[in-house]
Each structure stands twice: as structure tokens, then as C-alpha cells.
Image: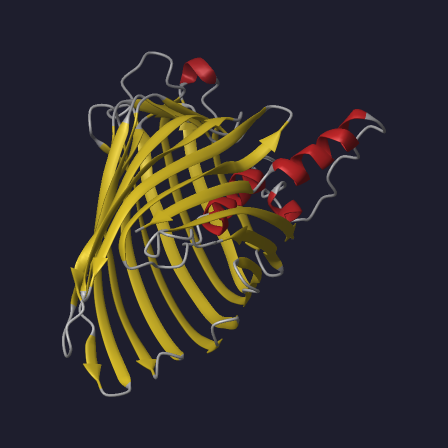
């Protein structure tokens, strides 16, 4: 078993979206906003998104809704996903309440990571998150709870027929904010993931636990500001299941049985530094972040017996453990724009800006040959056209623009 060379690009696309979706400064009263940009661009296609929203804040009451779409023509992911996000609440003197959530939907969607390959005829899911901030003088205590689910229609996962199902994701959090400058946050997540046959028989079951803790320092004034975060993430997961003639009911299924077990654990350190400067009605924001796996490995074992028609052979193989240490990514995000006020319209303003993200991954080459866990060198590109394609990918990926109107 190996992991396709396109997998790091897909992971980068997700990180680029998260980087490009950094929120605009909050404005009281009514605001309309829109944003669009690319996630990843290469010679095989592109992935981009658009997002539009409406928000309202009056005193201690706030609410908002955003809708958008992720669209991809990449080989690694071909299709479109629609999503909606919402939030609202009341920030009272002592105890507040904030509810946020969202849902997604997609029609036919296919992905090709060499191994695995899959398609889905449709899927949908949702999440809801509650926060209850408690204000005690200079200290804010913010407990939170998250729940999410996802379901997919008929499809195929690699060479056996099946689909994904996420019965539940639970998230528990606690944040402590001191003098609006020092933020200490803890989050714990627990997820169950199933791979089902198209008849909804369970083929494989997986579980994932994750814990993260971080410290954030905020500082600065009206003209300049700074925000720095340091954090640690621990994840542990396991998967097990079997393919048999009873849950693979098609004539040319080659195995009498195929059993699989696997595990994953990682310790990831991450950091983010953000600098904001507002000279007049211009604003510049520079964000620099990185994440690195300091400890971690992934391993799996499988055994099978083929039918006599396919040779009748038996095997027991192990994969890994693949050492994930020193695998990581660094990103640089530049955000610049203007926010002038219109004379005669004292309560009206608009914010117009552009963002560009740059990524530097490392260590992913070891995943290309996961059978042995040995690192291999990526193939050398030809001398001419790939250089142009490389610069096209660097310059156009992670590029976005946004507009926000406020009254």
C-alpha cells in the first residue's frame, strides 16, 4: 500500500482555504461581505471557493449567516460542495450564549489518490457548537460543546464497494481569557468513522481522539497590533474490519476474506504570529505559521485468502510503522486592503482587500513509499514546461479577494 503523490497537494488545498478564510474585522450594526479565491492550481485543474454573508450586531446581540461553495476540477478531487454557516447569541454582563453551526451538501464527487480511489453519489453533514462565556471581572471562562455528523450516498472506496459514514464527532472545550489579551484554550475531540457497503453493512470501523492546547497573546493599539499563538496537538486513531463474501456480493470479488487493522498517533507542535498595521485607511496584515510532527507513526497489518479462481494464495503483511516525525508545513499569508469612510455617510464604510498565501511543506516524500516507511526522492521534473507550471501553481494558489460593506 502507498499514498499517492497528490495527497500533499490536497492537504495543502485545505490549509490554503483555512488561511484564506481569516475573518475580517468585526463591525457593529449591519454588514454584507463576500470573498472568493483559489485553493490550489496546477496543470490538471484548479480548486476555488466563494463565500457571501450577512451579519448584524447591536449592543450585545449579534447574528450572521454565510453561504458558499467549494469547487474543484483537480484529479485528486473533482466536484463541488455547498456549505452554509450561521452564528448568533447574546453577550450579557455576566453570562452570555453563542450558538454557531453549519451544514454541507454535495452531489457526485470523485477523488483519486492512486490508492485509494473513490467516488460518492452525494453526501451531507452538519455541526453545531455552543459556547457559554462567563465574565468574572478581568477573567472570562468559556466552556464549549460541539457535535457533528456526516452521511454519504452510494459510492465506491478503492476496489471494494462502500461509502463513508460519520455517526458522531464530539468536541469539548474550555477557554480562559484574561484582560482580553491572554487566552488559554483546551479542546478534546472524539470521532467515530465507518466504511459501509452500499447495503449499509459495516465493513470497517475507525475511531479518532484528539486533544489540543494553546496559548495566545494579543497586543497593540488602534494603529498596530500583534497576535501570537503556540499550541500542541495529540491524535490517536485505530481502524479494523474485514471484507468477506457475505458483505462483498459481486461475482468477481477476489478474496474469501480480507482483514485489516491499523493505528495512528501523532504529537504536533504549531505556532502562528500575526502582525497588523493600519496607517490611515490602509491596512496590512502579515501572518506566519508552522506545524511540525515531532513524534508519530502510522502502521497497518492485513491478511487475506484469495478464491481458487484467483490462485487461492494467502498472505499476512505489515505496513510500517511509518515514522511521521519531521513532517510539517509552514505558511505565509499577506493581507492588504483599504477601509475608507465616505464623507456624508458617517455610519457607512467598506473594506476591500486581497490575500496571498504561500506554503512550504516538508517530509511528505516519506509517505510515497509507505510499504517500507523509507523516504524516497521525488522524480526530477523535465527542464522546461514543469518550471512554468510550478511558478503558476505558486503564484495562483491561495490567492483571494474580499469585500465588506457596513452601515
The reply to whether residue 167 is visible in this rendering is no
Is 257 or 45 nearer to us in this picture? 45
The picture places residue 392, in percent across and down from the top left corner, at: 69, 33
Is 133 or 324 nearer to us in this picture? 133
The reply to whether residue 203 is visible in this rendering is yes
Q: Residue at x 52, y 71 (%)?
A: 223
Up-down: is 165 above or below 63?
A: above
Res 149 → quadrant: top left
Is 32 or 1 nearer to us in this picture? 32
In the image, is 131 to the left or to the right of 138?
left
Give the farthest residue toward the front. 344
The picture places residue 122, in percent across and down from the top left corner, at: 28, 25
The N terminus - image quarter: top right
The picture places residue 187, in percent across and down from the top left corner, at: 32, 67
Q: Residue at x 63, y 49 (%)?
A: 358
Q: Residue at x 50, y 31 (%)?
A: 47
Up-down: is 263 above or below 17?
A: below
Up-down: is 247 above or below 185?
A: above
Q: Residue at x 43, y 38 (%)?
A: 303
Up-down: is 149 above or below 212?
A: above
In the image, is 57 to the left or to the right of 118?
left
Is 80 or 347 nearer to us in this picture? 347
Give the farthest residue toward the bottom. 137
The picture places residue 286, in percent across and down from the top left corner, at: 59, 60
In the image, is 50 to the left or to the right of 280?
left
Res 42 → quadrant: top right
How many discs mark residues in the rendered view?
0
Which of the colour schemes (rainbow, by chain, secondary structure, one colour) is used?
secondary structure
Amino acid at each position: 500500500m502507498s499514498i499517492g503523490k497528490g495527497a500533499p497537494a490536497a492537504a495543502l488545498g485545505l490549509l490554503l482555504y483555512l488561511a484564506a478564510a481569516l475573518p475580517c474585522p468585526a463591525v457593529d450594526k449591519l454588514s454584507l461581505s463576500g470573498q472568493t479565491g483559489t485553493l490550489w492550481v496546477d496543470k490538471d485543474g484548479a480548486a476555488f471557493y466563494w463565500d457571501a454573508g450577512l451579519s448584524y450586531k447591536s449592543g450585545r446581540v449579534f447574528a450572521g449567516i454565510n453561504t458558499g461553495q467549494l469547487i474543484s476540477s483537480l484529479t485528486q478531487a473533482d466536484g463541488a460542495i455547498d456549505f452554509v454557516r450561521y452564528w448568533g447569541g447574546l453577550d450579557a454582563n455576566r453570562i452570555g450564549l453563542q450558538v454557531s453551526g453549519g451544514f454541507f451538501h454535495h452531489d457526485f464527487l470523485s477523488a483519486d489518490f492512486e490508492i485509494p480511489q473513490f467516488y460518492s453519489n452525494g453526501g451531507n453533514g452538519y455541526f453545531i457548537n455552543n459556547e457559554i462565556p462567563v465574565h468574572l471581572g478581568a477573567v472570562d471562562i468559556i466552556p464549549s460543546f460541539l457535535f457533528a455528523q456526516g452521511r454519504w450516498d452510494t459510492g465506491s472506496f478503492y476496489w471494494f464497494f462502500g461509502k463513508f459514514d460519520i455517526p458522531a464527532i464530539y468536541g469539548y472545550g474550555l477557554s480562559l481569557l484574561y484582560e482580553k489579551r491572554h487566552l488559554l484554550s483546551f479542546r478534546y475531540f472524539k470521532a467515530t468513522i465507518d466504511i459501509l457497503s452500499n447495503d449499509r453493512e459495516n465493513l470497517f470501523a475507525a475511531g479518532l481522539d484528539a486533544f489540543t492546547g494553546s496559548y495566545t497573546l494579543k497586543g497593540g493599539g488602534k494603529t498596530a497590533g500583534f497576535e501570537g499563538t503556540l499550541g500542541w496537538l495529540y491524535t490517536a486513531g485505530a481502524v479494523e474490519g474485514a471484507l468477506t463474501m457475505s458483505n462483498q456480493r459481486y461475482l468477481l470479488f477476489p478474496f474469501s476474506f480480507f482483514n485489516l487493522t491499523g493505528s495512528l498517533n501523532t504529537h504536533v507542535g504549531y505556532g502562528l504570529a500575526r502582525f497588523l498595521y493600519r496607517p490611515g485607511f490602509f491596512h496590512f496584515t502579515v501572518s506566519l505559521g508552522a506545524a511540525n510532527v515531532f513524534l508519530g507513526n502510522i502502521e497497518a497489518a492485513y491478511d487475506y485468502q484469495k478464491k481458487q479462481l484467483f490462485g487461492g494464495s494467502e498472505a499476512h503483511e505489515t505496513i510500517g510503522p511509518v515514522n511521521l516525525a519531521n513532517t510539517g508545513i509552514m505558511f505565509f499569508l499577506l493581507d492588504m486592503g483599504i477601509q475608507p469612510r465616505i464623507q456624508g455617510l458617517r455610519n457607512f464604510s467598506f473594506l476591500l482587500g486581497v490575500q496571498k498565501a504561500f506554503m512550504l511543506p516538508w517530509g511528505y516524500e516519506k509517505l510515497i513509499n509507505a510499504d517500507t516507511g523509507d523516504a524516497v526522492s521525488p522524480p526530477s521534473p523535465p527542464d522546461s514546461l514543469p518550471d512554468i507550471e510550478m511558478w503558476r501553481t505558486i503564484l495562483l494558489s491561495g490567492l483571494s479577494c474580499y469585500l465588506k460593506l457596513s452601515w
